[in-house]
Amino acid sequence: MKEYKYLSAQQREHFLEHGWVRIPNAIPKEHVELFSSNVWIRLGYDPEDKSTWKQEKVHMPRHRQIPTKDFAPIAWGAMCELLGGEDRVATHIDIAYTSGDSLICNFGSEYWENHDISPRDFDNWHVDGDWFTHFLDSPEQGLVVIQLYNDIIPRAGPTWIVEDGLSYVCKWLHDHPHGDDTKSLCRDPETGVPVDEIKACERFVELTGNAGDVFLCHPFMPHSASKNHLRIPRFITNPPVSLKEPFNYNRTNPEDYSLVELKTLQSLGVSSLPDWKITGERLGFTPRTRAGKDALIKSELARMKAHAEKTGGVVESMHLKSEVVV
């Protein structure tokens, strides 16, 4: 029988029932502060003046990164247990096993202070992984990881998930072994309107919590950004985690299935998939969000340098050598 050090029996049962689990206090406070302390400098926004919040949502680039095992050891332990053990997790690609300061900011807008919207009508429902062709067994996206960098309460821009949408995505990928790039999984690629299956779902959940909490979701869990009606600035990150080998839905020993694999099989209503295999080619490509983040690097570096010149501080970024500005 497998031994679990980080996930309690209740958390494991919750994941198998709901497809996600919350890991409280998973990121040490000092690491939360490390990656969020200069967010306003990088943005060029005044935290006390909403008129300077030029964009409702900002996907910031990454300047610093730390292996998740060191950055958030509790979260890392839980991630490995969900995926069947640390020996199955890929560590040969930096982006796939590190946490970085690529904060995803949600500032809301004046319009949404006074208007409501049903989560069924969000235009951002999607499945993560915009850099590879998706298959039911794709190893590139082992989990959806959501790290919280401030306390997030209802109506203040939390990520939403739709639990019963998971079965829809699993079935779609099972029935399309040639693969998909996720555009057509949860919404119309032209209009952004959620597909009928998502609009018909019932189990919509707001992922609220405290700074340092981490949510670990099944890799096929449909999720969406929400409207920040309260305009309390919301900061999260969404680092990927990958596997060395594709998920295996036909293991000789049933006890060798990971919790993620078990949830996939459960969602399909089967105990194994002995005859299923991909028929398309595993392809990788440039993420659709890359251009936007690359465009922000130069402006963020300029603001960080200007601030360092005033304070005699240090500019830390993987995009240039750390330098002391005097």
Image: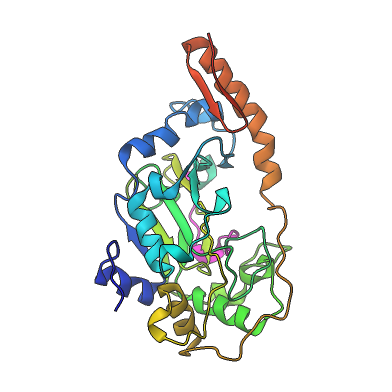
Magenta-highlighted stretch: main secondary structure? loop
Q: Which residue lies furthest to the top in this view?
A: 326
Q: Where is residue 228 in the image (x, y as percent from the top left)?
A: 47, 47
Q: Quadrant of residue 232?
A: top left
Does the segment drawn in magenta span residue 116? yes
Q: Could you tell me which residue is drawn at 57 percent across and 72 percent down?
A: 246
Q: Position of residue 27 (x, y in %)?
A: 35, 46
Q: Could you tell me which residue is drawn at 27 percent across and 63 percent down?
A: 5
| Residue 206 in sight | no
Relative to 68, residue 203 above or below: below
* Image quarter hosting the N terminus: bottom left
Q: Could you tell me which residue is drawn at 46 percent across and 60 percent down?
A: 160
Does the segment drawn in magenta span residue 304? no
Span colored in magenta:
113-127
Q: Quadrant of residue 139?
A: bottom right
Q: Where is residue 301 in the image (x, y as percent from the top left)?
A: 61, 26
Relative to 189, residue 261 above or below: below
Please state which of residues 234 and 33 is positioned toward the viewer in this rendering: 33
The answer to whether residue 63 is left or right of residue 271 is: right
The count of marks equals: 0
Relative to 299, residue 228 above or below: below
| Residue 109 in sight | yes
Relative to 192, residue 105 above or below: above
The answer to whether residue 59 is left or right of residue 283 is: left
Please state which of residues 209 and 116 is positioned toward the viewer in this rendering: 209
How is the structure coloured here? rainbow
Q: Could you tell me which residue is drawn at 37 percent across and 66 percent down?
A: 81
Q: Where is residue 188 in the image (x, y as percent from the top left)?
A: 68, 67
Please state which of residues 262 and 248 is positioned toward the viewer in this rendering: 248
